């Protein structure tokens, strides 16, 4: 008990920041969830819905390489406050358009692009802030705690968002989002002190020179660089999955908005369980082995069960197996970066990491939307009722998305096996 109390005292600044930012994240996640359902109900197109995420991630990928250089020279707390305020302003604009009956899909693309830009600037500042307010011995626990909040939000998002939409529609969801923003903003502004280095490295450097230092660091750390490439390939597969997932669950026989919420809730429960495991697990002998094993488990289970399953029970089982090990993977990846990247370089390195690791996400979302709408759904429509594909994946809208899940399962397994043989990543 004494050790527990001591840990709480040492982590109290981080815990306050983590709790309030997580609460704000719940509001943002509810708005995003509601907008996916709203956009799919408007157009019935996987591609149109996937473009919501493309527009969000595109500025994040394009500008991340410079954002870290800016973050290393800017005040971390001020950066986070300004970026949170910008994101909240977009919610207000969306709410005004909605109440005036003028909200259209293209408005959401613009709003998501602005949010993506705000997140681009905030994320490296937040990562460095976490490093500065937290003792080094808690780095792995932080990875688990952050996934704990993420998983809890995943559990609560479909439940609360569905309830709010039933009571007051999109307006009620957006209002809750703004409430969570004000709680996080006021706490960060008046209740949290984030230390700033005096004479920060790179403060007088030109932006391009500062960004190049982050790139140069990764070139010299081949192990971290190859791990980032590994996650980049996995993100491509995962984003194709994310683009096809709502299209399948909302369209398939046995699927519905309620079933989508149920499966997402089970995924949240899985990440919740995994985050608890990550928080209390001892440091492994090889963090790389944990990362590889966790991703292989995910890729070799969920996609097959979603593809071949015909009931919500099987889809929920797939969601659980696919996500339960992901927090453990992320906690170990986060620990590798925090332990091996110098603090005064972290903003720049994290930003370059974001560009390299996440540039495949908008590509995957766009590719997934195109493959569902233009390739796999038409292919399944052309099948005879007694064909092998119909027997495997069913018939009607949504069967093409199921077929796509079957294909990307093999792609994901292949990516895991390929990088497992990469000697550079096994130094950690």
Image: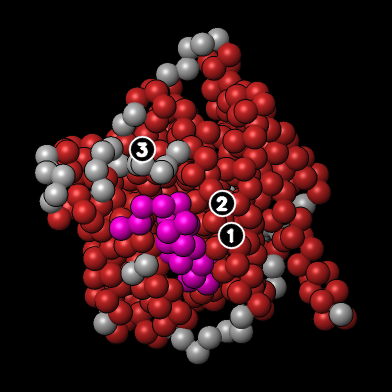
Residue 130 in sight = yes
Cα–Cα gap, marks 2 and 1: 6 Å
Magenta highlight range: 308-330
Residue at the spot 65% in from the left edge and 23% down from the top edge: 168
Residue at the spot 40% in from the left edge and 78% down from the top edge: 293
Q: Looking at the picture, how far across and down is residue 86, in whole percent?
A: 58, 32
Q: Is 175 situated left or right of 57 in this image?
A: right
Q: Is 238 situated left or right of 135 in this image?
A: left
Q: Are marks 2 and 1 in contact (CB under 8 Å)?
A: yes
Residue at the spot 27% in from the left edge and 76% down from the top edge: 417
Residue 217 in sight = no
Q: Residues within 10 Å of mark 1 (few under 14, many from 20)?
A: many
Q: Which mark's residue is nearer the viewer, 2 or 3?
A: 3
- Element under label 1? helix
Number of numbered labels in the structure image: 3
Q: Are marks 2 and 3 in contact (CB under 8 Å)?
A: no
Q: Looking at the picture, how far across and down is residue 212, in whole percent?
A: 36, 58
Cα–Cα gap, marks 1 and 3: 24 Å
Q: Are marks 1 and 3 in contact (CB under 8 Å)?
A: no
Q: Is 65 situated left or right of 335 in this image?
A: left
- Element under label 2? helix
Quarter of the rendering occupied by the C terminus? bottom left
Label 2, on which residue? 265
Label 3, on which residue? 251
Label 1, on which residue? 269
């Amino acid at each position: 008990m004494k050790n527990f109390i001591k840990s709480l005292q040492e982590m109290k600044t981080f815990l306050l920041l983590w709790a309030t930012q997580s609460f704000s994240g719940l509001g943002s996640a509810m708005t995003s969830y509601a907008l996916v359902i709203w956009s799919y109900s408007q157009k019935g197109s996987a591609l149109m819905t996937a473009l919501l995420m493309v527009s969000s991630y595109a500025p994040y990928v394009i500008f991340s390489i410079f954002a870290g250089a800016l973050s290393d020279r800017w005040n971390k707390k001020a950066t986070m406050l300004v970026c949170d305020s910008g994101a909240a302003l977009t919610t207000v604009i969306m709410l005004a358009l909605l109440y005036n009956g003028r909200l259209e899909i293209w408005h959401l693309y613009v709003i998501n692009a602005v949010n993506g830009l705000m997140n681009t600037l905030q994320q490296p500042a937040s990562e460095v802030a976490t490093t500065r307010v937290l003792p080094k011995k808690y780095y792995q626990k932080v990875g688990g705690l952050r996934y704990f909040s993420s998983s809890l939000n995943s559990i609560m998002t479909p439940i609360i968002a569905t309830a709010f939409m039933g009571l007051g529609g999109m307006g009620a969801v957006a209002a809750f989002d703004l409430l969570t923003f004000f709680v996080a903003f006021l706490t960060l502004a008046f209740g949290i002190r984030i230390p700033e280095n005096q004479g920060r490295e790179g403060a007088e450097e030109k932006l391009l020179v500062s960004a190049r230092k982050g790139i140069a660091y990764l070139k010299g750390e081949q192990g971290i660089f190859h791990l980032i490439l590994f996650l980049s390939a996995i993100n491509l597969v995962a984003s194709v999955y994310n683009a096809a997932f709502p299209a399948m669950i909302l369209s398939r026989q046995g699927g519905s908005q309620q079933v989508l919420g149920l499966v997402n809730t089970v995924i949240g429960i899985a990440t919740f369980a995994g985050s608890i495991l990550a928080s209390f697990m001892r440091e492994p002998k090889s963090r790389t082995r944990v990362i590889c094993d966790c991703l292989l488990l995910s890729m070799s289970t969920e996609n097959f069960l979603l593809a071949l399953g015909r009931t919500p029970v099987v889809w929920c089982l797939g969601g659980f197996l696919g996500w339960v090990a992901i927090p453990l993977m992320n906690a170990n990846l986060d620990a590798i970066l925090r332990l091996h990247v110098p603090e005064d370089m972290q903003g720049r390195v994290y930003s370059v990491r974001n560009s390299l690791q996440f540039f495949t996400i908008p590509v995957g979302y766009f590719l997934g939307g195109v493959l569902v709408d233009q390739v796999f759904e038409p292919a399944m429509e052309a099948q005879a009722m007694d064909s092998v594909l119909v027997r495997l994946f069913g018939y009607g809208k949504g069967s093409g998305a199921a077929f796509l899940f079957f294909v990307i399962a093999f792609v994901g397994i292949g990516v895991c096996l390929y990088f497992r043989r990469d000697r550079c990543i096994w130094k950690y």
